[in-house]
């Protein structure tokens, strides 16, 4: 911790003195103020840099950072003729006409600066490799999806895996700087689908909000992932269609079509996909019970596939000062995970040392599916007498019906006779709803604003669980009424927040406080598992930014977060992933609380950009899956509050245009990760130095031909019960644009050298597990994307992520 404190101090001092050496800000009687907004929907463009230039020689005369309402105020030292410029990765560069500042017009307020979306002005080849792939804003990282051509045909996970400090496990779970628990949003609204169900072709940007403000949901200790989708801005029809196929038999088709006419916009999108992950699996497990020492060696193939089918239609109506919106989405999701394994078992009696051997073949799967429908409505009203004075309201309802979780295992001897097995079914329905009301009041000539709001969230799930176990003596499966479980779960959260923000010259701040009252009730046919919980929590947030000069920016952020336990963490009944691996929930698991601090610095040196961030994250009551012996040869996994953990480290990103045809970028992260196992539950204190590095090279071979070579190193990591070994892999992508760039063809080769492997060791006093997983590689993926009218092709092919392995949950 002393080392990190020293690094933060050095970073701050260097940045401040470096900035002061290049720019000194004196009190001035002259000011230039205004507001920066999006030309299409007049939404504020927050935390972007506005520079003031002398009209005579274009030299810099001052600058300011817009606040969250898009407002800015720039001081200048003397009268004269000036002009303004605005640079932002999402928009065309803006330059105003010249204007005069004099004693008679000492305080100039310019007309609103309307920025035009860059995608309508730049060809796709010009955009990629010229924009920074990750940009650091005051309160978030903004990932430009168009920069990841190797993510073509993939999903949001494929883009996220290429960003600093993000790890993706084989089940699509995300951890960031050692913490899991992201909340997923689409266009600032809670998402109806997982990240691996959001196709890249419909993504404009991804925002990673690691220290969310008090306005955002407090749930999700790692922060919020907000997917910004492509939208139609110009009048008329436009659209895109994307096709993908891979050597693993993955396939996908998704489309987006839109129509806009004056004050009305309508969009229709959909997807039909099946995505496969196939791995070779090997596991050695040793279990000690009072009577028997069991050694189990299993090997075989593990597979996972995810099917998604949906249609979504939405519209926006702009009328005077009010915007109305509505959307409907319906679809079907299907997730299957399983495989075939060969088992070699040895059972040694602790009493006499005699050993019995057994050889079996097994097949198992977990199958989850449901139909779903979602409805959204929203309203935004802009008060006419004060710019930036807003009232917004939104409501969504999400229903998942005919939901099924089906678990099945079978074991046969070498003669093909059934030896063991089970069948389990969990029938469910789920309902989620959320209502928001938000109010914004600007003050001090739009330089500041006050925000307040209320949110209601409610979730209900009703389930019925049955299990049949194979009885070798009877030679049949028999219902286990003693394991039957019926439950009803409900969680309600009422939230209020208040925030204030302001910008003065080069300094901006945002501070807020959120209060949440949580209620949950778990009803269950097992009396010991029933309980009700009430809790009132407070979540402060602070964000600061200082623009040192045109090329340097310093930012600081703090927030407190919570991770509410998911229901499947609490379900008090046993299910079998395979016959030797059981799982059971913990109905009394507690929420996690996380405090996060982050200090960031950005610098431009010519066309080269550098971003750095130092961070510290402390989490209380960490939730983790713990493995213990269950009975002879079988382990039991359960979610438990294992203690506290801490992550302290740094991230670096650099983008260098080496030549006009060669663009180089690299990002890396390092952090010290510690687990303090305060409760001493089947584990111990652990510490690791975690780091990962991504190096990417983009080559423009011809005007419409691009090649990309990527190298990834993912360092080792630890958990309460073990360690995961490091791994390395290479990806190669080539993309060709045809038909005036309307048609794009891509080929991605993933894990070119077949070097990726997942090696995990877990241990406790009476259990040891060593798991090795090799993904089937190299993986070849081909994609075709066609666009018409105003949409630019968003490149598709099954992408790069570290989600290479199937079987890590075993």
Image (cartoon, rainbow, N blue to C red):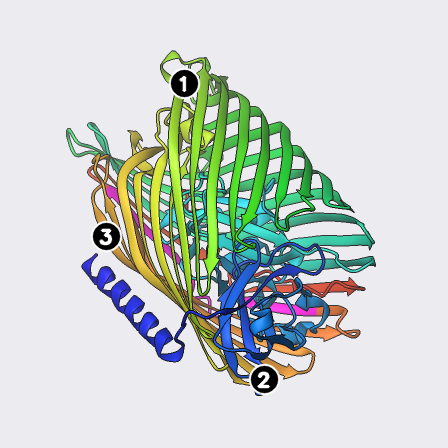
Label 2, on which residue?
A: 661
The numbered mark, 3 or 2, whose residue comes first in the sequence reads 2
Q: Nearer the viewer, residue 9 or 469?
A: 9
On the image, the x and y values in percent for residue 109 come to 61, 64
Q: Nearer the viewer, residue 254 or 379?
A: 379
Nearer mark to the viewer, of 1 and 3: 1
The range drawn in magenta is: 745-763
Mark 1–mark 3 Cα distance, whole angstroms, equals: 36 Å
Decide: few, some or many residues near mark 2? Use Cα within 10 Å; few <14, some 14-19, many ≥20. Answer: some
Asked if residue 752 lies in the magenta stretch, the reply is yes
Nearer mark to the viewer, of 3 and 2: 2
Label 1, on which residue?
A: 532
On the image, the x and y values in percent for residue 740 come to 78, 75
Decide: few, some or many residues near mark 1? Use Cα within 10 Å; few <14, some 14-19, many ≥20. Answer: few
Q: Nearer the viewer, residue 709 or 192?
A: 192
Nearer mark to the viewer, of 2 and 1: 1
Helix, strand or loop: magenta stretch:
strand
Residue 603 in the image: above or below residue 172: below
Residue 304 in the image: above or below residue 26: above
Q: Secondary structure at mark 3?
A: strand
Q: Residue at x 45, y 19 (%)?
A: 521
Drawn side of residue 208 relative to residue 235, left or right: left
The answer to whether residue 721 shows anywhere in this view is no
Asked if residue 206 lies in the magenta stretch, the reply is no
The quadrant of the rendering that contains the C terminus is top left
Label 3, on which residue?
A: 687
Mark 2–mark 1 Cα distance, whole angstroms, equals: 62 Å
Q: Secondary structure at mark 1?
A: strand
Mark 3–mark 2 Cα distance, whole angstroms, equals: 43 Å
The quadrant of the rendering that contains the N terminus is bottom left
On the image, the x and y values in percent for residue 799 come to 56, 61
């Amino acid at each position: 911790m002393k080392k990190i404190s020293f690094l933060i101090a050095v970073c701050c001092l260097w940045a401040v003195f470096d900035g002061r050496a290049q720019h000194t800000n004196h009190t001035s009687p002259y000011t230039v103020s205004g507001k920066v907004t999006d030309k299409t929907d007049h939404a504020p463009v927050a935390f972007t840099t506005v520079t003031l230039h002398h009209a005579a020689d274009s030299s810099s005369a001052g600058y300011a950072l817009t606040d969250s309402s898009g407002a800015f105020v720039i001081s200048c030292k003397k009268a004269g003729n000036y002009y303004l410029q605005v640079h932002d990765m999402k928009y065309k560069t803006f330059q105003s006409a010249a204007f005069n500042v004099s004693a008679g017009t000492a305080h100039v307020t310019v007309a609103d600066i309307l920025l035009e979306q860059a995608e309508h002005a730049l060809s796709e080849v010009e955009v990629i490799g010229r924009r920074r792939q990750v940009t650091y804003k005051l309160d978030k990282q903004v990932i430009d999806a168009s920069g990841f051509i190797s993510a073509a045909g993939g999903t949001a996970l494929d883009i996220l895996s290429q960003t600093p400090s993000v790890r993706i496990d084989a089940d699509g779970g995300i951890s960031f700087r050692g913490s899991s628990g992201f909340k997923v949003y689409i266009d600032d609204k809670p998402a109806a689908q997982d990240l691996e169900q959001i196709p890249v072709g419909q993504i404009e940007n991804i925002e990673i909000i690691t220290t969310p403000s008090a306005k955002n949901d407090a749930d999700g200790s790692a922060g919020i992932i907000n997917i910004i989708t492509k939208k139609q801005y110009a009048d008329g029809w436009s659209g895109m269609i994307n096709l993908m196929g891979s050597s693993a038999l993955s396939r996908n088709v998704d489309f987006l079509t839109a129509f806009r006419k004056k004050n009305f916009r309508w969009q229709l999108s959909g997807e039909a996909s099946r995505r496969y992950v196939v791995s070779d699996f090997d596991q050695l497990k040793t279990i000690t019970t009072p009577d028997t020492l069991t050694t189990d060696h299993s090997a075989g193939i593990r597979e996972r596939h995810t099917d998604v089918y949906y249609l979504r239609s939405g519209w926006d109506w702009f009328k005077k000062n009010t915007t109305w919106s509505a959307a409907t989405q319906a679809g079907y999701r299907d997730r299957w995970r399983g495989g075939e394994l060969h088992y070699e078992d040895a059972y040694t009696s602790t009493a006499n040392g005699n050993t019995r051997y057994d050889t079996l073949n097994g097949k198992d799967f977990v199958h989850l599916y449901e139909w779903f429908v979602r409805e959204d409505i929203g309203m935004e009203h802009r008060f006419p007498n004060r710019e930036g004075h807003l009232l917004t309201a939104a409501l969504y309802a999400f229903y998942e019906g005919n939901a099924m979780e089906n678990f099945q295992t079978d074991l046969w001897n070498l003669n093909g006779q059934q030896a063991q097995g089970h069948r389990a079914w969990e029938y469910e329905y789920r309902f989620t709803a959320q209502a928001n009301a938000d109010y914004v009041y600007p003050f001090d000539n739009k330089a500041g604003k006050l925000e307040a709001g209320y949110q209601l969230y409610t979730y209900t799930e009703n389930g019925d669980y049955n299990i049949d176990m194979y009885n070798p003596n009877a030679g049949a499966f028999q219902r286990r009424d003693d394991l039957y479980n019926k439950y009803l779960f409900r969680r309600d959260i009422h939230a209020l927040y208040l925030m204030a923000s302001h910008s003065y010259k080069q300094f901006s701040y945002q501070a807020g406080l959120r209060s949440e009252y949580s209620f949950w009730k778990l009803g269950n046919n097992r009396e010991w598992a029933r309980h009700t919980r009430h809790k009132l929590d407070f979540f402060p947030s602070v964000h600061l930014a200082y623009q040192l000069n045109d090329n340097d920016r310093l930012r600081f952020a703090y927030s407190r977060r919570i991770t509410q336990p998911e229901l499947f963490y609490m379900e008090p009944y046993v299910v079998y992933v395979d016959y030797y691996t059981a799982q059971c929930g913990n109905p009394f698991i507690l929420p996690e609380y996380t405090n996060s601090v982050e200090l960031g610095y950005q610098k431009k040196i010519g066309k080269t950009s550098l971003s750095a961030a130092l961070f510290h994250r402390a989490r209380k009551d960490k939730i983790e899956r713990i493995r213990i012996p269950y009975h002879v040869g079988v382990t039991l996994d359960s979610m438990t509050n294992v203690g506290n953990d801490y992550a302290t480290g740094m991230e670096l990103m650099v983008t260098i245009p080496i030549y006009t045809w060669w663009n180089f970028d690299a990002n890396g992260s390092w952090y010290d990760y510690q687990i303090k196992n305060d409760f001493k539950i089947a584990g111990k204190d652990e510490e690791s130095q975690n780091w990962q590095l991504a190096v990417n090279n983009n080559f423009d071979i011809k005007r419409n031909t691009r090649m990309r070579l990527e190298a990834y190193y993912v360092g080792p990591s630890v958990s309460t019960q073990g360690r995961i070994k490091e791994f390395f892999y290479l990806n190669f992508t080539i993309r060709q644009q045809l038909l005036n760039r309307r048609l794009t063809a891509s080929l991605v080769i993933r894990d070119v050298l077949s070097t990726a492997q997942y090696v995990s060791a877990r241990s406790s006093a009476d259990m040891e597990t060593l798991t090795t997983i090799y993904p089937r590689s190299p993986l070849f993926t081909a994609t075709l994307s066609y666009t018409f009218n105003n949409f630019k092709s968003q490149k598709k092919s099954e992408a790069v992520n570290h989600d290479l392995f199937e079987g890590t949950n075993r």
